[in-house]
Amino acid sequence: MEDHNTANISEPASPAASVASAEIAAEFAALSVEEKEQRRAEWSQELARVEEEINTLRTVLASKTRHASDLKRKLGITVWKELTDDVNQGFKNVKESTVFQRTESVLKSTGEKTASVFGSITSGITSKFSQMKNSESMRSIEEKVGSAYENVKALNRVIKWRS
């Protein structure tokens, strides 16, 4: 079991760990050869015990996971149902969050203001069209288009009559 990961020991993760590593190295260097060997033997034994405990815990966890899966299967709880329940719970949590409620309120207010602006624009356009429709210019255009249409219709009748 000499397959120890020495990269983690030689490369500290933070400045504080670096200082601690330097202190440990200094203390270790001050030991006699016999004390160093004894410490290494103690650490190796402790590491072996910890790795054995980790493996035992992994085995127990795998067994418990299988047992939980069997119970869920017997209860009719499928992976799909769990996923659906988790997603639904997530949506519920989001909807109940104050951030979502504030965002919803802002969006609702913005929608109402936008609808009000579009309503004003629409009524303004409708009003302008009504004014245009009742204007002299529009009546004149309507008369000219109407008489042009009647002339084309009459011409079409003449052409059909001659054929």
Image (cartoon, rainbow, N blue to C red):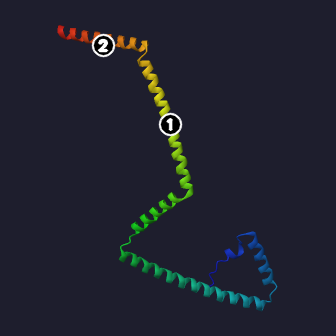
Between 17 and 144, the one lying in front of the other is 144
Residue at x-position 53% and y-position 39% = 113
Between 111 and 28, the one lying in front of the other is 111
The local secondary structure at tag 2 comes to helix
Can residue 30 be spotted in the picture? yes
Amino acid carrying mark 2 in the image? Tyr
Q: Nearer the viewer, mark 2 or mark 1?
A: 1
Residue at x-position 61% and y-position 85% = 50
Q: Quadrant of the C terminus?
A: top left
Q: Quadrant of the N terminus?
A: bottom right
Q: Look at the picture and state if 117 lies above or below 22.
A: above
Q: Where in the figure is residue 70, as x and y percent of width and height?
A: 39, 78
User: To which residue does mark 2 refer?
Assistant: 149
User: To which residue does mark 1 refer?
Assistant: 116
Q: Where in the figure is residue 65, as x and y percent of width and height?
A: 46, 78
Q: Where in the figure is residue 100, as x and y percent of width and height?
A: 54, 55
